[in-house]
Image (spheres, helix red, strand yellow):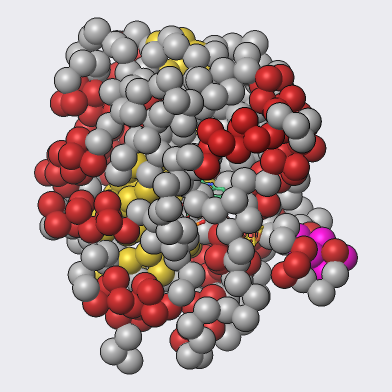
Amino acid sequence: MTDPIFQPLHFRNLTVKNRVFRSNISGRFDNEDGSLSQTRINWECKFARGGVGAIISSYVPVRLDGRIIAGYATIHRDDFIPLWAKLGEAVRANGAKYILQLSHSGRQMDLPGIHNQLRRTPSATSRAEPLHGFLTEAMSTGEVRRMVRDFARAAWRAREAGLDGIELHAANGYLFTQFLSSAINDRSDCYGGSLRNRARFLLEVIAAIRDTVGSDFHLQVKLSATDHNNVLPWESKGNTLADTIQVAQWCEALGADALHVSTGSLFPHPLNPPGDLPLEILAVTYDAMISSGIHGFRNFLMFRYPSLRPIFRWMWFRMKKGRPVEGVGLDEARAIRNAVSIPVISTGGYQNASFIRGAMERGELDAVSIARSLVANNDLVKQWAGGADVPERPCTYCNKCLVNAPKNPMGCYEEARFPSRKAMIDELMSIYSTRADLKIPEVQQ
Ligand SMILES: Cc1cc2nc3c(=O)[nH]c(=O)nc-3n(C[C@H](O)[C@H](O)[C@H](O)COP(=O)(O)O)c2cc1C
Ligand code: SF4
């Protein structure tokens, strides 16, 4: 086959069988203590069976105080290594590689849970997150250095578990973004001020990981090409593409093997995931977050009362300015790819094989990562291999999966894609299992 989508991608330390990565998707699959569950194994294996070359995990905190929501698996304990090993083994048995996303929320913590309730989350800054008003406290220089060691130890655990690589989540508003962004970082020590200083935390983590796991373990970095931090119009814009190109080059120089290019200094963001924002669903799911931040109740009222929704809609959708959904970040990925020599994976709205093929043939990216179109059609890659350009029941980019996430199981909530509501719920529930021991789901050819 000469189709570029199906050519293997050779990184320095890893080969992936094609150019399609399942992008990170968080869901509440796991246990309160951070141990991963059979449900997560079932979930990940669905995508492996569907033909993707690699799965990049959901957000996996390196510490318990870095969770976004309780019920997501963590990698903060050595005794979790065998669980992650089991997951990696299951995904590989179903034909894909498994890359673990190492993360810390910093101030962007949606639902604190019992461990973090009534505490201010460690961040680069003491200023509250502006949209929801999550409270936070700037780390001391010594605390930042401890955090660097915690990331390195987590990378070591991923390697001990035999996983295929790690990704540092330095995008979308989480802790690394809080250091990198000129709109967020207000420090006066060696981790604040110039771009080099703001990047110091990320670069120290890369260096510490290389010291701990060596240079032959795959390490990629997810970066937001542009902050677009002014979702609230009075906030400043934050880092530019030129800033991120510089950070990308520093990451490469320190031994990063690939870059995963996203956008936005918060999550979700009008441009990530691109598409709609169903406020009528937020009106019944956002109540879970009312007490998380000092602006939670204000936001809830805007979602709850139809007459107030236009205010939020205007604020959110004004950022899009006619940008496409499919390939929303392609221009920026191309600019970064032109400035580095390691492979670049682009995320944002990909679903159409001929669109992706064209971008690959023009040398604009090395691979795509896909979240929602694969949630909608787990076997999208197999459908492309069979000659389809777009699936019969495509993802509509409605973002109902996203806004259900704080309260409900992860999956596709676009009822129009299913023969009935019952069929949709059956599909959502299909990954749950009552088995206590972790099993590798059957391989289906
Ligand atoms: C429900 C949901 C959960 C997500 N969780 C994560 C996450 O844990 N880590 C991350 O880096 N990105 C996360 N993302 C962003 C996706 O990985 C992806 O980059 C983004 O949705 C754009 O790709 P898409 O248009 O193919 O969905 C999430 C997206 C969705 C919709
Ligand atoms: S709910 Fe389904 S159709 Fe809508 S964005 Fe999510 S995966 Fe796509």
Magenta stretch: residue 423 in it?
yes
Quarter holding ligand 2: bottom right
Residue placed most toward the observer, 314 or 244? 314
- Please tell me whether the stretch drawn in magenta is mainly helix, strand or loop: helix
Residue placed most toward the observer, 427 or 299? 299
Per the rendered image, the range of residues in magenta is 422-428
Residue 135: x percent and y percent? Answer: 54, 13
Q: Residue at x 17, y 20 (%)?
A: 194
Residue 330: x percent and y percent? Answer: 32, 58
- Count of numbered marks: 0
Q: Residue at x 59, y 11 (%)?
A: 119
Question: Is residue 439 shown left or right of residue 381?
Answer: right
The quadrant of the rendering that contains the C terminus is bottom right
Q: Quadrant of residue 178?
A: top left
The quadrant of the rendering that contains the N terminus is bottom left
Q: Is residue 225 visible?
A: yes
Q: Quadrant of residue 423?
A: bottom right
Q: Is residue 40 visible?
A: no
The image shows residue 99, relative to residue 363, as above or below, that is above
Magenta stretch: residue 186 in it?
no
Q: Quadrant of residue 153?
A: top left
Question: Is residue 201 shown left or right of residue 72?
Answer: left
Residue 430: x percent and y percent? Answer: 76, 64
Q: Residue at x 57, y 32 (%)?
A: 68
Residue 289: x percent and y percent? Answer: 69, 27
Residue placed most toward the observer, 52 or 331? 331
Question: Is residue 200 shown left or right of residue 177?
Answer: left
Q: Residue at x 30, y 76 (%)?
A: 358
The image shows residue 275, relative to residue 286, as above or below, that is below
The image shows residue 165, relative to residue 319, as above or below, that is below
Question: Is residue 323 shown left or right of residue 396?
Answer: left
